[in-house]
Image (cartoon, helix red, strand yellow):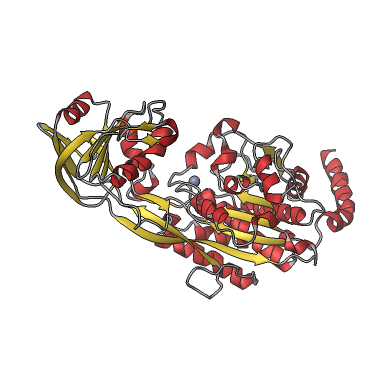
Amino acid sequence: MKKTILLILFVGAMSFQPSFAQKKSPALPEFQIKKSETEAHMRFLAADELMGRRTGESGNFVAARYVAEQFRKLGLSPVTSNAGSNTVSYFQNVPFEKMGASAAGEIIADAEIMKAGEAWLLMNGGETNLKAPIIYASFGLEDAAKSWDDYKGLDVKGKIVLVESGTPEAQTPTEIFATSNEKRKLAASKGAIGIIELFNAPVPWNIVLRAFGGEKLALSQGDAAATPSIPHAWVNGKEAKYARALRAVKEVEFKTTGRKMQLINSYNVAGLIQGSDPKLKDEYVLLTAHYDHVGVGRQGGQPYTAEDSIFNGARDNAFGTVALLTAAEALSKNPPKRSVLIVALTGEEVGLLGSKYYAANPLLPLNKCIFNLNSDGAGYNDTTIVAVMGLDRTGARAEIETASKAFGLGVFADPSPEQGLFDRSDNVSFAREGIPAPTFTPGFREFNGDIMKNYHQVSDNPETINFNYLLKFSQAYTYTARLIADRKVAPQWSAGDKYEPAAKKLYGK
Ligand SMILES: [Zn+2]
């Protein structure tokens, strides 16, 4: 019986096949991609040889090079022309300042000898050997509007300034961090030669040491030389004896080996596919995925062993990068109506910096960009779906569902809302500009199980990837991009969305 029914079903399905095939899987190239292609991209990008693709290091450059040469092979047009160069290339230079891991040293206040890395952390400054008067300047801030000046009546020239962290109103970590650089600059501008800040946030000191003691990357401000740099220490202010000693003395010794500052480049990799419609091709869809990851050993910030110390970042985010390369291939072979700009982003793991830089230095006008489809993820634990952060906010639910269904995948909107994932990937850099920008993520409904097991762990390697799913995911991503690029009317933010005002400003409507 069962067999008979199966046979009838089978014959039935067969007879439906031709019309189904013609309608749903036209000869579009994304339907022809082979599993071996997506698997090869993954095995390369997440290989041990790339050493975790850490921003600014050689594995990161190799990944960028790989993406660029795929673009070349597929015939995408380069669109960048970097300052000082007249060659157009696929690489957009992204300049970073790299500050070395925390330094050794001592701050001595009379009998109190405070050691760096225990009692205090060097936040800025090179090699230093100071013995100088110390002067207390409250919070070390001034605000003309509130006629508030902590430096009023103080002569700090040639002295070390002692200040409290944060502001009189706020002692949150965010506020402390936000005001810290400002305090250093202000102290330097008043002629101080060093600054010691008593860190008082309700955060365990060992977490502060871990969070701020490692190597740090920031986007280069370009005016680094113009900003006077004085040594700046955060002292554990909750250890009463340190605060007491520093307040009591007239003079301190401040010695450190310094944190090494280095200017480095990494790259966003960009390629353009011209749209096929003479009118609509001036508009474009922006496809993004970050290709960087966290590196090797201590850089990963998570457990590792001598046998396996490489954070391969197969799920995070070779997966999305493969989807991007799949789109490059399929959309270049048969372009949609609007143009498509594909940008593989660097610097995501160090604070969404590649996308931040791109949004501030776009290669094509942002107001011609109708949509950003970003792909990023921590992993997956449901290979029957894709998860889309911002599905119901960004006006393209129909295209996303149609495209996913064509490859047998359902769509799940905004899993783990408590994690605030929409604002935790590169899409937010574009959303802030007003561009509808969801993130297309490998399938999960909750941030648990396999996700936690692999998220930023050495186990996130190609050996544990479901390659059938990688293919389908990449195809669904590509077909979604096509359907959106072919739309008559550009997608819109849902009414009342927090990014809607930015959209009005960007598009002027
Ligand atoms: Zn990550």
Say left or right for 66 vs 382: left
Which residue extends farthest left? 111
**Image x and y of residue 469, in percent:** 63, 49
Picture quadrant where residue 362 is located: bottom right
Q: Specify whether 376 is left or right of 145.
A: right
Q: Position of residue 277 (x, y in %)?
A: 80, 65
Residue 34 shows in the view: no
In the displayed image of the protein, which residue is found farthest to the bottom?
Answer: 86
| Left or right: residue 96 compared with residue 270 | left
Q: Is residue 156 left or right of residue 352?
A: left
Tell me: residue 364, above or below residue 199. Answer: below
Q: Residue at x 26, y 34 (%)?
A: 153
Q: Quadrant of residue 274?
A: bottom right
In the picture as drawn, the residue positioned furthest to the top comes out as: 240
Residue at horizontal 60%, vertical 40%?
422
User: Where residue 201 sits in the image (x, y, percent)?
Assistant: 36, 28
| Quarter of the N terminus within the rendering | top right
> How many labels were placed on the picture?
0
In the rendered view, would you say 258 is above or below 262? above
Q: Nearer the viewer, residue 421 or 329?
A: 421
Residue drawn at (80%, 53%), measured in percent from left and top? 487
Image position, residue 421 (x, y; %): 57, 38
- Residue drawn at x 36%, y 56% is 224
Check the image and report above or below for 26 versus 452: below
Identify which residue, 27 or 429, lies in the foreground: 429
Residue 128 can be seen, yes or no: yes
